[in-house]
Image (tube, rainbow, N blue to C red):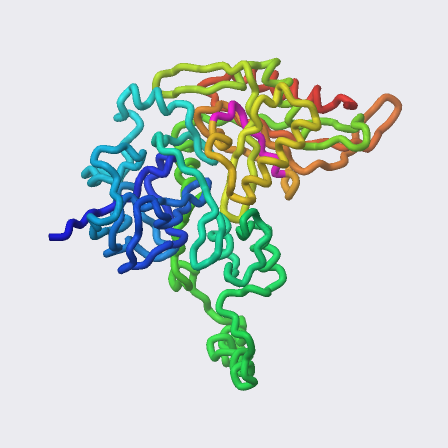
Amino acid sequence: MSQTKSFNLPDLGEGLPDATIVEWFVKEGDVIKLDEPLVSMETAKAVVEVPSPFSGKVLKLAGAPGDIVVTGHMLAHFEIDPNLPQRAEGQDTGHHHGAPAPAAAAPAPAATQAPAAAAERADEGTVVGAMVSSNAVHTEQAVAVGGVKAMPAVRAMARKLGVDLSRVRATGADGAVTMNDVKQAAEAGTAKVGTAPAAAPQAAQAAVAPAPAARTEAARTPLSAAGKPMRTAPPGVVAKGQPEPLKGVRRNMARVMADAHSKVVPTTLTDDADIHAWAPGNDMTSRLVRAIVVACQTVPAMNAWFDGENLTRTLHAQVDIGIAVDTDDGLFVPALRNADMLDARGVREGINRLRQQVEDRSIASSELSGYTISLSNFGMFAGRYATPVVVPPCVAIVAAGRARFQLTPVMGGVETHKVIPLSVTFDHRACTGGEAARFLRALIDDLALMH
């Protein structure tokens, strides 16, 4: 009698309660061998390839691309083939794919965790805050599927942009399709999924003909057929479209922001830094990083972690700055390590590297955790002041608004000076108002310097 086994979605190294299916490398009825690629899953920070824990026939898959699977729930069901290699019983793979516990669908409150487990996970983080992880090590590799070799993140990007990987010119090592190859194909429109080689005239004419629904939508008017103003209903009465579940980075961001809102006692101070004395060529972000380092060294209480449950504070000697990076997929906060040891060039190179890795979704989880204070330079888009969110265990975040010119009184008259609006939000449980004000003063003073 053949033996069947289920493989439940393991903890993918981030402690998140679920993950999103990006692409199956097999279909139901296929035979797969041990450790061959089974599926790629999107988590809060990356697209992770999950290998098969068994050799045998795939009987059932959990869902289609885009579906969300809860950690600990069935991902795939197999009919074991005894003639193919199997993992020895009891061999630790780092995957926890046994039967889920009764409460697997709902994360336990932090207070119920064992002290040892809590201590072990105290310094781990997500793209925007604290998280837990297993000891499993996951490495992304360029996997050949359907004759096309590409990293899981590249396949996810191709699916998102509607690019057919089999029609993309590969420039990567060993013939692998790179992220840049996919983006170039998307811009050129040469590898669209489902594009026919040529369209018949009738088909082309039908394609451009407006659908009845489109004509109805275009005919919308604020007047009724009688020429009188239309009476409209509130948007909530008749809603169009389907609710869209948050996935990946955005899903995790929603959880972390809600958790931060429930735990932190935030207070925000705002002021302007006069940068009239700056010499040409100053890098705005690099100067902000340097100013944060100086302010943290002046007021160490702002460069700290706070444990609200045990009422303990950890001051840090090094300054690791989480740099908020906005993407279409959501917010990432990679850590610029040892910012207090970097010169302006080192800061710029470090930020460029982190941004590129975020864009390619190739950034390591270790780069997204453990920062001691964070920076949001939202002013590169718009806005002056803000109330940025402090994410535990950090106690402070600095936000820089859009630089502007203002009239400034000087000896003998008035001058036009360029200023940067600054906002500093701090957890008032861990820092006093005086400490935050002195921190902001140190920021302003350093930014006022010529170099």
216 displayed left or right of 414: left
Q: Tell me: residue 2, above or below residue 315.
A: below
Taking the view exactly as shown, the residue that stands out farthest to the right is: 412
359 displayed left or right of 58: right
Say if the magenta span includes residue 186. Answer: no
Taking the view exactly as shown, the residue that stands out farthest to the bottom is: 202
Q: Tell me: residue 302, above or below residue 70.
A: above
For the image, the number of numbered tags is: 0
Q: Who is closer to the viewer here, 275 or 345?
A: 345
The region drawn magenta spans 370-378
Q: Quadrant of residue 446?
A: top right
Taking the view exactly as shown, the residue that stands out farthest to the left is: 1
Q: Tell me: residue 151, above or below residue 146.
A: above
Residue at x 30% of width, y 19% of height: 116
Say if the magenta span includes residue 377. Answer: yes
Residue at x 65% of width, y 28% of height: 347
In the rendering, at what x and y percent does residue 449 appear? 76, 21
Quick check: can you spot residue 253? no
Residue at x 45% of width, y 53% of height: 144
In the rendering, at what x and y percent does residue 288 appear? 66, 28
Taking the view exactly as shown, the residue that stands out farthest to the front is: 83
In the rendering, at what x and y percent does residue 101 appear? 20, 37
Q: Quadrant of residue 190?
A: bottom right
In the rendering, at what x and y percent does residue 2 appear? 14, 52
Q: Who is closer to the viewer here, 379 or 121?
A: 121
Q: Who is closer to the viewer here, 420 or 62?
A: 62
Q: Who is closer to the viewer here, 425 or 278?
A: 278
Residue at x 54% of width, y 40% of height: 358
Q: Tell me: residue 317, above or below residue 320.
A: above
Quick check: can you spot residue 276? yes
116 displayed left or right of 260: left
